[in-house]
Image: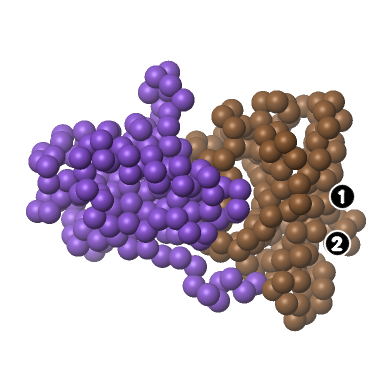
Amino acid sequence: MTRSLPLGLGEVRLTKDQQDQLCVFGLGSCVAVFLYAPGASAVAAAHVVLPKSPGTGDAGTVEPGRYADQAVPLLVAEMAKAGVLRSTVRAAIAGGAAVLGFTSAIGEQNIQAVRRELELQHIQVEQEDVGGTRGRSVLFNAIERRLEVRVLSAPNFNI
Amino acid sequence: MRQGADPHALGPVLADLLGVPVELSEQDGEALVLRDLPSLAGPPENPAVAVYLSDESGEGAQVLLLFPLWDARALGDLMLGEGASSADILDACREIGNVLAGRFMSDLADSVRRRLTPTTPLSTVDMAGAVISSVLASSPAGTRVSSLGIRLHTAECTIGATLLILQAETVR
């Protein structure tokens, strides 16, 4: 039976259990990052809130996934600790929406920052669903290694 | 909760506007860790009508009002009569947001001796958590989050809503 592991704002999780599904519910301008590898059971995820950490003083934050520039290297390190060969690691990303007009800048900055960090780590983005103006819930199944995205269905927009 | 502006003053404002008894319950966002804040208005995936206003500087005070969809419909029935259109209900929610934000910012302006003028309300229908997390992410560092649960008691039902008040250090 599948077990859902939800990630809150700034949270990081890693699982080696293929029954697990890493989830981020109600994602707006934030970006969910999932790292996985063909043939490996480990999947790591972060719920990134902002593109860049304010400085080294915040390195010990209780939400290590809060900033893209800290979250991605941390996920890579977690995958390495789990014994996954770095050259096999792939990424799936989702989020970065502008659910209210004024949040468009932060969503786009988050997307760009996550892409940049992944590129620095030489990790290919294989799956993505980013941008737009609607919130999402995203689920990553450890067995299928597939990103599933849910948005509100049309009837929900009618009050 | 804070010096100066008392959010409980918003209860009578809302009761006068809608003509029903209003209950407010307070939950201080500071008591919650960041990761849980998108759940302040219930499960983050649940659809909600969201109304957002900030002061014109964009960096002082922000107000976010969230109605679960069912509650927004019930509010439409209360304010406009049964069968109101989605557009009219959204207008009604915006009006409530406007009144609450206007009163709160006026009280806050008095207490910090600064001019605070609310913007035109922005509104959307989307996942509650997506809206809350987006507003949080766009807020200046050090912003304090306070949450008020609102219950409107009509003859037929109770309508629930959540009011989030975000204050930057500059207006505390």
Q: Which mark is residue B12?
A: 1
Name the kind of residue labelled 2 in the image. Answer: Leu
Chain under numbered label 2: B
Q: Is residue B128 left or right of residue A35?
A: right
Left or right of B68 on screen, residue B80: right
Chain of the residue under label 1:
B
Q: Quadrant of the C terminus of chain A?
A: bottom right
SS for tag 1? Answer: helix
Q: Nearer the viewer, residue B3 or A116?
A: A116
Question: Of residues A127 and B148, which is closer to you in this image?
Answer: A127
Instruction: Specify few, some or many for label 1: CA neighbours under 10 Å numbering under 14, 14-19, or 20 or more.
Output: some
Residue A21 appears in the picture as rendered = no
- Residue B61: name its quadrant: top right
Q: Is residue B70 visible?
A: yes
Amino acid beneath label 1: Pro
Which chain did the renderer colour brown?
Answer: B
The structure residue drawn at horizontal position 53% and vertical position 53%, both measured from the top left corner, is A98
**Chain identifier matching the purple colour in the rendered picture:** A
Could you say whether the residue bearing mark 2 is in a helix, strand or loop?
A: helix
> Left or right: where does residue A26 sit relative to residue A34?
right
Which labelled disc corresponds to residue B18? Answer: 2
Q: Which residue corresponds to the image point at 39% horizontal and 19% vertical from the top-left?
A: A56
Residue B109 on image: x %, y %:
83, 32
